Structure formats: structure tokens, C-alpha cells
Image (tube, rainbow, N blue to C red):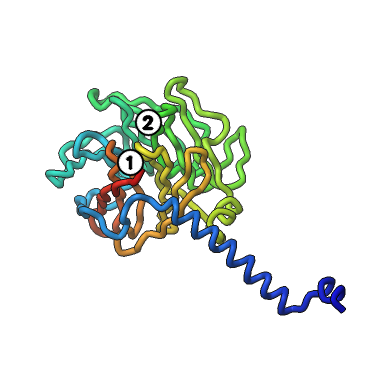
Amino acid sequence: MILNLFLFPSMKMIHSAKIFILFILTSLSLHIQAQDRPPYDLESPKIIYTLPDYLEEVSGLTYFNTNQLAMHNDEKGRMYVFDLKKRTVVQRVRFDGDGDYEGIERVGEYIYIVKSNGNLYRFNVNIEGVVEKIETPFDSKNNVEGLGYNPKTNHLLIALKDDGDTPDVKVAGKAIYGYNLNEKTFDKLPHFSVSHKDMERVLGKDYKFHPSAVAVHPLTEEIYVLSAHKRALMIFGKDGKPKNLTDLKRSLFPQPEGIAFSPEGDLYISNEMEGEGGTLLWFKMKQQNH
């Protein structure tokens, strides 16, 4: 009878075992998320800025200068420099005609801006009217949504919202590609890619992730990726592995489309707003214990 008990466990034993396994998996998921929680109180911004009406569809965001951020309208080929102390736009630069612009990044004296169809533009902040177009392996099916910069490798990071494939590479899931500024070439393979299975394995739940913005933390080197579709912030390690997922409150983040950091690690997130100027949220970085 003892032998039969072990060979043929009761339904109650099976049910108990399932509950135990689920408890362990959930605990591991919560532990991963807790230990890698972002060093910001994302429910208490230091300041909420209301942007002008013409920045209703503010999309990309980048650190421009001391107390200044550069941004652009989703549909207009113009860059705007917003002064955090003056709380107003202090500079405007027209770089191209109307289009679906989705990401902006300043690297040295150059501004890079990307369209959803994959077109990448570059111009010198000190020279007006001269804009260079950079050929990319992306097109409208990729739906490019984010542009960031990794200073350690001197690469632009280009986040694809939809299809992660290029003519040379097939990708299972979402992908972020790199553009080598030293060689002026795109890396053939993604900087990293994440499948739904990867997300489920780390987070303990099914999660369909659609990147809308990307930025590299200047102090931790972690990669922060926004998802406007899910109103979420995802943190990836330097190795591209997902570390944390934070859901964002609708009241503060109606449509998060832009992300940037100051050199000190303060976080800025911009939101598109329907029928009025967008918003810009400033979060101070918490003191880290070492």
C-alpha cells in the first residue's frame, strides 16, 4: 500500500504540489523585481512641467545642456530646447518637413533624430540648415519608436516597436539595434532582443512589450525602455536581460513617449496629451547604498 501511494499520488497531493511550485515561482519573480527596482519614486515627481500646445504630441527626449532638454513634436520636423529653470522653450530648430518622428538623441555637437519608417537624420547644433540622412536597415514594418545612446560603446540604440527583423536577421520578439558611431555602421545583430517567453520567464507572467523610448542610465549603465502601450517602464541589464518591470500610473503617465537622464542620474519622462500641451516629469534619483 505504501508503494501504491507513491506511484499513484492523490489529487490532493498533486494540487498541493502545484500550489507550492506556483508559490516558489511567484516568490522568485517578486524577488527579482524587488532587488532591481528603479531608484526613483515614480509616483512622486519632483516637478511636473506643462509644455506648450504645439508640443501636444511630444515624442523623443534627450539631455541637451545644463538645465535643458531637447525634444520634438511627433509630426513636425522641428527640435525644441526646453529650459527647466525658465520653464519654457528657449530655442527652435527646423531640420526637415512634416513626418512621423519618434526619437531624438544628442551626442557631442550632433543631434540624431529617427522616423518611424527607419530614416535617421543628423545635424550639428551649431550649424543651421545642414542635415545629413543616414541609411538604415529598417522600414515602416519595424515601426521605429525609440532612440538612445550608450557612451561606453559609442553606439546609438534604436528600439523597434513591432517587427524586429531586418533583411539580414530574423528575430523572435522585440529588438534594439546598435549604430556604431566610430565605424558609422549598423551592427548586423541586435544589441539585444527580448521574446515574450523571456519576459514571462523573468517576470512570472505573460507580457507583450512594445518599446516606445529607450535611454541608458549614466551611472548604472542599465537600459531603460518605456512602453506607452502598456504604460510601463522596463529595466534591462547591460547584458540585455530584463531585470524589472514597473507599471506606471495613468494619471501621471497617460502616454509616455520620451525618456532621458541628466548626467547626475535624474530621470525625465515626457507624455503626449490629446488636445493640450504634453507633460514633462522630473524624478530625482534616490541616494544609493554601497
| Residue 23 lies in quadrant | bottom right
Tell whether 196 sits left or right of 263: right
First in sequence: mark 2 vs mark 1? 1
Regarding mark 1 in the picture, which secondary structure is present there? loop
The label on residue 98 is 1
The residue closer to the viewer here, 103 or 33, is: 33
The reply to whether residue 115 is in sight is: no
Identify residue for label 2: 121
The label on residue 136 is none
Q: Is residue 285 above or below residue 63?
A: below
Q: Position of residue 42 (x, y in %)?
A: 32, 56
Quarter that holds the C terminus: top left
Give the number of callouts. Answer: 2
Tag 2: amino acid: Tyr
Q: Residue furthest top?
A: 183
Q: Position of residue 34 (x, y in %)?
A: 44, 56
Quarter that holds the N terminus: bottom right
The reply to whether residue 212 is in sight is: yes
For image coordinates 43% across by 44% down, the residue present is: 145
Rate crowding at label 2 as few (under 14), some (14 to 19) or many (20 or more) other CA atoms within 10 Å: some
| Residue 62 lies in quadrant | top left
For image coordinates 42% across by 24% down, the residue present is: 181
The residue closer to the viewer here, 71 or 260, is: 260
Tell whether 2 sits left or right of 281: right
Q: Residue furthest front?
A: 2
For image coordinates 34% across by 46% down, the residue present is: 289
CA–CA distance in space, label 2 to label 1 = 14 Å
For image coordinates 39% across by 37% down, the residue present is: 148
